[in-house]
Image (cartoon, rainbow, N blue to C red):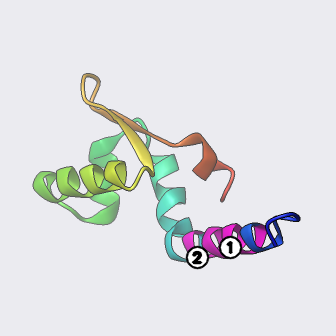
Amino acid sequence: STTTGLNVRESVTHLVNIIYEEYSSLIQVLRTYENDVQGLGNELKKDSVEMRDLLNNLEIKRFIEIDRVSKTYKVRQGLKYLV
């Protein structure tokens, strides 16, 4: 209901569960290699073009924040609590 917010809580819980089921293993790997993009590429067996596309897509989905100057990324703070 709109007064209790129960429907909103259930919807958010459902969405968080879906994200966890679909992306938890990827988020753990991303956290491990935050400062080593080349190591992440080796772990995922992707070349530099595939890694660029993957990281750009993850940034668009707001899973990570890319620092293009230092060529690193950070997993967004809220996702760190998810896994």
Q: Residue 34, image x and y in percent? A: 44, 41
Looking at the rendered structure, the kind of residue marked 1 is: Ser
Between 76 and 35, the one lying in front of the other is 76
Circle 2 residue: 18
- Principal secondary structure, stretch drawn in magenta: helix
Circle 1 residue: 11
Q: Residue 75, image x and y in percent? A: 49, 44
Q: Which quarter of the picture shows residue 41?
A: bottom left
**Span colored in magenta:** 9-19
Would residue 16 be counted in the magenta stretch? yes
Residue at 42% in and 45% down: 64
Q: Residue 71, image x and y in percent? A: 27, 31
Looking at the rendered structure, the kind of residue marked 2 is: Ile
**Which quadrant of the figure contains the C terminus?**
bottom right
Q: Secondary structure at mark 1?
A: helix
Q: Residue 82, image x and y in percent? A: 66, 58
